[in-house]
Amino acid sequence: TILIVDFGSQVTQLIARRVREAGVYSEIAPFNMAEEAFHRLKPKGIILSGSPAGVPDEGSPRAPEVIFESGLPILGICYGQQVMTHQLGGTVESGSGGDFGGEFGRAFIEISEECVLFDGLWQVGEKHQVWMSHGDKVTEFAPGFRIVATTEGAPFALIADDERRYYGTQFHPEVVHTPDGGKMIGNFVRHVCGCAGDWTMAEYKDAKIAEIREQVGDKKVICGLSGGVDSSVAAILIHEAIGDQLTCVFVDHGLLRMNEREQVETLFRDHYNIPLVVVDAEARFMKGLAGVTDPEKKRKFIGGEFIEVFDEESGRVGGADFLAQGTLYPDVIESVSFTGGPSVTIKSHHNVGGLPERMNMKLVEPLRELFKDEVRDLGRELGLNDQFVGRHPFPGPGLAIRIPGEVTKERCDILRKADAIYLEEIRNAGLYDAIWQAFAVLLPVKTVGVMGDQRTYDNVCGLRAVTSTDGMTADVYPFDASFLTRVSTRIVNEVKGINRVVYDYTSKPPGTIEWE
Ligand code: XMP
């Protein structure tokens, strides 16, 4: 086990993920609970995360002294490096004032000495890309350390004390923009800490099942299915833990894709034998969405209405105490603003931000620390087939956030047809698995066209397809022109209400994947 001490960085979960990728189990503990976690976990090594705080700031967090007394290996990342330096007797200076304004984004480090973290990766004299994001920096390292690599802005980009097995990086090895960073973390947990690297998703599943049993006891759980992979995996996992104490509720809010309701019914009722209630709430959602055009208002309404429907249904199934949701880590990080931290709300995710205060159930969210691809692995572990776990993500608010402007049943019907054609063509072309997410969008714009010598004045349909590994960043999928032509022709010919098709050529950032 590796203990990750969290100082509030946005990307602490990425550290945990990299450790999992190296086949090692880890737990994250907030810095002020790390001492307790240390004694409980008996870890083989410790990683100190980054932070929105600065070491020179008054009241900024410190690592518990016990980790320095333990004789265990420590890897300090960014703030972690600085706090370690400070606590071991070095100096950290603030970026404000002086000639150092901080270093943000891509940087290149030059390797000046050998280091165990570079095993199989980097040689002395080479330069490699890393990702920096820091305002403060170490100006004098603590006794026992040596400099291993430098960047222009950070003379102590990587420092090491081999005797005590302490390592500190100014850059962020956990993010994908440090291409070799994951392997470097792997070197730390395996070669330095001596972890075996044989931990698997099967163990994660067993641990989560035990955790769910403990949390829920003999109480009842109600789980909202969205039709997507996340809520399905959450439900199946919970069902494996507590059997028929779980009831799944599938709300047909009228914002679903073509045939989605039928597919969910087949999978849950027939295949997994999980108690399933299907609620036909289309009319209710459409009524509430009438006249709503602001994306955040749509999201809040749909999230709130969902919970209301659950409350009613849970009353009907005999009172559930827990509400299960398939919230993933990217949902959490993009929705929650850390107190005092720099993270801002981009979108109120349905699973998180839409929850009204008066909700009277406790939450079970067994996927909260996972990324999408890890959820897929977990789904396979639970017996879901590749085709199902390979399904593109689908957001809780459904088609509503793919219909900018007012959402009506008529517009949903139009979009459903166009979307189904687009996805059918993608499947036929064998491209489905190469794409993270593909969907159609219905724009609140009418344009003039001509069909069969007649003037048309109809809606524009946008097509979106992106590649991604975790939904946090995304690239546009580069279809052949002939493919797009075929889809465009079919949609305009077959879907009444659309006379023009455009392709969205925006990556994330600056765009988001969904349009709202
Ligand atoms: P964005 O649009 O923020 O989306 O780039 C990132 C990923 O999250 C999905 N998404 C959601 N998933 N509830 C969900 O369960 C939501 O409210 C929600 N909003 C966006 C989106 O489809 C993409 O995969």
Image (cartoon, helix red, strand yellow):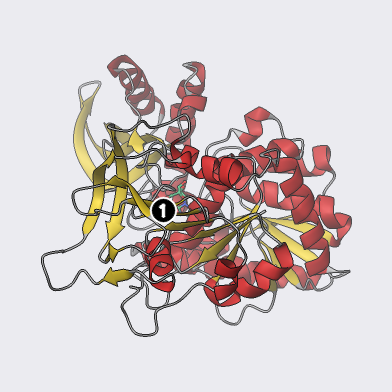
Q: Secondary structure at mark 1?
A: helix
Near mark 1 (Cα within 10 A), the count class, few <14, some 14-19 or many ≥20, is many
Residue at the spot of label 1: 401
Task: Identify the residue at horizontal 35%, vertical 74% (top origin).
Answer: 55
Residue lying farthest bottom? 58
Give 344 or 283, whichever is nearer the viewer: 344
Task: Identify the residue at horizontal 59%, vertical 33% (top origin).
Answer: 390
Task: Identify the residue at horizontal 32%, vertical 38% (top origin).
Answer: 462
| Figure check: 158 above or below 507 | below
Q: Is residue 101 visible?
A: yes
- Image quadrant assignment for residue 211: bottom right
| Figure check: 11 above or below 202 | below
Q: Is mark 1 within 8 Å of ligand 1?
A: yes
Give 226 or 29, whichever is nearer the viewer: 29
Quick check: 34 left or right of 471?
right
In percent of width and height, residue 434 lies at: 47, 25
Quick check: 164 left or right of 239?
left
Picture quarter with the C terminus: bottom left
In percent of width and height, residue 18 lies at: 53, 45
- Image quadrant assignment for residue 453: top left
In percent of width and height, residue 64 lies at: 55, 74
Quick check: 272 left or right of 340?
right
In percent of width and height, residue 72 lies at: 60, 58
